Amino acid sequence: MATAELEVKSLLAERINALEESSTLAMTKKARELAAQGHKVISLSVGEPDFKTPAFICEAAKKAIDDGFHGYSPVAGYPDLRKAIADKLRRDNGLTWGPENVVVSTGAKHSLANAIQVLVNPGDEVLIFAPYWVSYSEMVKLAEGKSVVVTGAFENDFKVTAEQFEAAITPRTKVVMYASPNNPTGTEYSEDELRAIGDVVARHEQVFVLADEIYEYINFTGKGHFSIGSMPEIRDRVITVNGVAKGFAMTGWRIGFIAAAKWIAEGVEKLQGQVTSGACSIAQKAATAAFNGPLDETRKMSEAYHRRRDLVVGLLREIPGFKVAMPEGAFYAFPDVSAYFGKTDGKTRINDSDDFSLWLLNEVFVATVAGSGFGAPNCIRISTAAADEALVEAVGRIKVSVAKLH
């Protein structure tokens, strides 16, 4: 490391130096750099819908501008949006929270970070079900908590069992956090599996649940989504996080929320009032329309993701050495590529998933994300939120490239 870089690093706060860069954003940045050099990069690294926001939602945003919603919004969100979210939770999730239990933030990522800051003291343990989204452990680090990773086996579709979960609980455990459907695996915990996990929580009264449900509407099981917060015995210890990014193709609108016991919601509002204040006024009006409106476009998007899942998993399973579980939601495939660790093309040796992912980008200009950042170092994440033609071309390039490894 250069002397100047060392000097600058020493000036930064220790909490920033301790943070890891988001692996998904880092790979996306590298892919853009190669594309800018004229290479035909197929980027399957970013978790972003390739659909446009439904027109009726955009119209609501335009109307909000015309109606003069140009000022600061309330810290916890506009009352009509908080009511729309409470109605949605009651209708779709069996959660009987009122608007006073809801806090709107600038995306589900912000909502997760708020909840962790409000609940976690230095030294508190946060159990994280792995594979996990890259930012979970870094959010815990910022709160000076300790991440305790509990890993779901490939043979169990990457799902953590209730027995594994209970065995990891200690007197220092404060929060357990997970996503279902999961990023990066696409795993969906069933109602029975979540009820078993909820039963464990009920036996350990100091444990809170942070349930990330941002992929709720992208679900291929045909059984519907189950929210662990609907279990009455643990209701007051579950913080449900969701938003509009994935199900409504509204990533750039930056609207997420938590729904929780009033004292937790008040804590989040207090924190947010000192950091960001209220979320974008126009985006809130758009989100209100989304939660109050029809789900026709959302269902069409989910159907497209379902079709692409079948396409990509089928193609990946044709590649020798790839082990591929069948995702039940979200828009990712997460193959185990460890069969290629230790192999070389004569120029580059593949030691781990980081090497493998970077090699694919440099070799055939396909951007994926190494599983190491998700707590699954044998895997790579492939986003299926792309056109069918691009997905077929990308997997074809991968298949040709790995044939060179020996």
Image: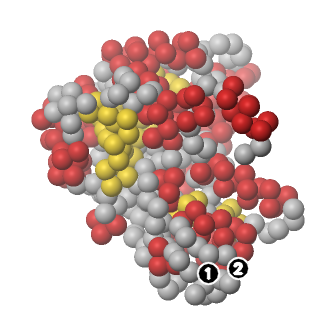
Q: CA distance from mark 2 to mark 1?
A: 7 Å
- At a point 27% along the width and 40% down the height, the residue shown is 228
Residue type for callout 1? Thr
Question: Which numbered marker is on residue 344?
Answer: 1
Q: Residue at x 64, y 48 (%)?
A: 25
**Residue 19 visible at all:** yes
Q: Residues within 10 Å of mark 1 (few under 14, many from 20)?
A: some
Q: Which part of the image, by quadrant, shows the C terminus?
A: bottom right
- Nearest to the observer: residue 280 or residue 12: 12
Residue 361 placement: quadrant: bottom right
Q: Quadrant of residue 21?
A: top right
| Location of the N terminus (image quadrant) | top right
Q: Secondary structure at mark 1?
A: loop
Q: Residue at x 25, y 25 (%)?
A: 236
Q: Position of residue 190 (x, y in %)?
A: 27, 54
- Residue 202 location, x and y as percent? 15, 34
Q: Residue at x 74, y 31 (%)?
A: 8
Give coordinates of residue 135: x percent, y percent.
Answer: 51, 42
Query: On the rendered structure, is 12 left or right of 223?
Result: right
Position of residue 381 measured from the top left corner of the image (x, y, whole percent): 53, 62
Q: Is residue 339 above or below residue 32?
A: below
**Mark 2 vs 1: CB contact within 8 A:** yes
- Front residue (pair 386, 348): 348
Dot 2 falls on a residue whose secondary structure is loop
Q: What residue would you read off at disc 2?
A: 347
Residue 406's place in the image compared with 57, above or below, is: below
39 to 264, vertically: above or below: below
Residue 364 or residue 5, whichever sits in front: 5
